[in-house]
Image (cartoon, helix red, strand yellow):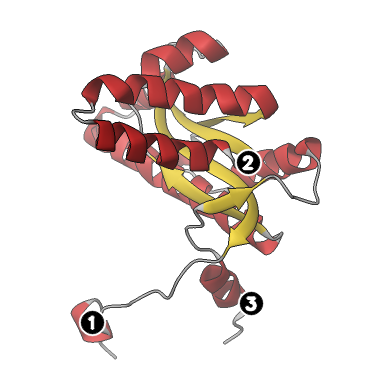
Amino acid sequence: MKTDLLDLQKQRRSIYALGKNVDQSPEEIADFIKETIKQAPTPFNSQSTRAVILFNDYHKKLWDIVLNNLKPHLKSEDAVKATTEKINSFSNAFGTVLYFTDMDVVHDLENQFPAYADNFYDWSEQSQGNAQYAVWTGLAENGIGANLQHYNPLIDEDVTKEFGIPESWKLRSEMDFGSIESPAGDKDYMDDDKRFKLFK
């Protein structure tokens, strides 16, 4: 079996030490992300995944929103300090992709195919996984690190207002990306016999 894909999968890691020293322009990266999401499979070709790609001050504003929404929930000075450092590390990256699901698409499919109505939201989440993993792996192939965060729904209202997000778009995750300033550590794997069964 060819291993090109496996090699890329091993290269794709959660990178938290990110910087702005990337070789590609924002336009090149945005075009790549858009095309990658377009090519990711979706059930019924529903194409329910939406993305907002942020650079420069827009990227920084996103992480300011995250921090401002987190602070009221922090109970100590130490928690504020630790959380601020964490969010600043995301802000230090080159950009962020916000991933959304267009719930109008999901509801339309529920109405069109009532026999499968209970499945369409779950399937839209699978579409999200396909798109996010494809972008993440593609960025890694181009020497760009990334990690995936989930501050939704805490930040949903402010994100919608700040970036003019349609009401039907439901925020699912935030992926910050940039130059790899420090690599990921070793990754542990559970035993195969606990994860897989083979019948032949």
* Residue receiving disc 3: 4
Residue neighbourhood size for the residue with mark 3, other residues' Cα within 10 Å, grouped as few (<14), some (14–19), many (≥20): few
Q: Quadrant of residue 82?
A: top left
Q: Secondary structure at mark 3?
A: helix
* Residue at position x 47%, y 58% in the image: 14
Q: Residue 196: x percent and y percent? A: 26, 79
**Position of 146 relative to 105 (above/below):** below
Report how far apart the C-alphas of labels 1 and 2 lie in the structure.
33 Å
Question: Residue 17 at x, y = what percent?
Answer: 54, 54
Label 1: state its secondary structure: loop
Q: Position of residue 57 (x, y in %)?
A: 66, 23
Q: Determine whether the residue tagged by mark 2 lies in a helix, strand or loop.
A: helix
Q: What residue is shown at x 22% (from left), y 34% (from top)?
A: 118
- Quadrant where the N terminus sits is bottom right
Q: Is residue 198 visible?
A: no
- Mark 1 crowd level (few <14, some 14–19, many ≥20, 10 Å Cα): few
Residue 199 in the figure: left or right of residue 168 = left
* C-alpha span from label 1 to label 3: 24 Å
The one of 65 and 134 positioned closer to us in this rendering? 65
- Name the residue type under label 2: Lys
Q: Which mark is residue 38?
A: 2
Residue under label 1, please give it: 197
Q: Residue at x 41, y 18 (%)?
A: 104
Q: Which of these two is toward me, 79 or 192?
A: 79
> Closest to the observer: 197 or 135?
135
Residue 29: quadrant of the picture: top right
Residue at position x 53%, y 69% from top? 9
- Asked if 142 appears above or below 108 in the picture, the reply is below
Instruction: Decide which of tag 3 and tag 2 comes sooner along the chain.
Output: 3
Label 3 and label 2: CA atoms lie apart by: 22 Å
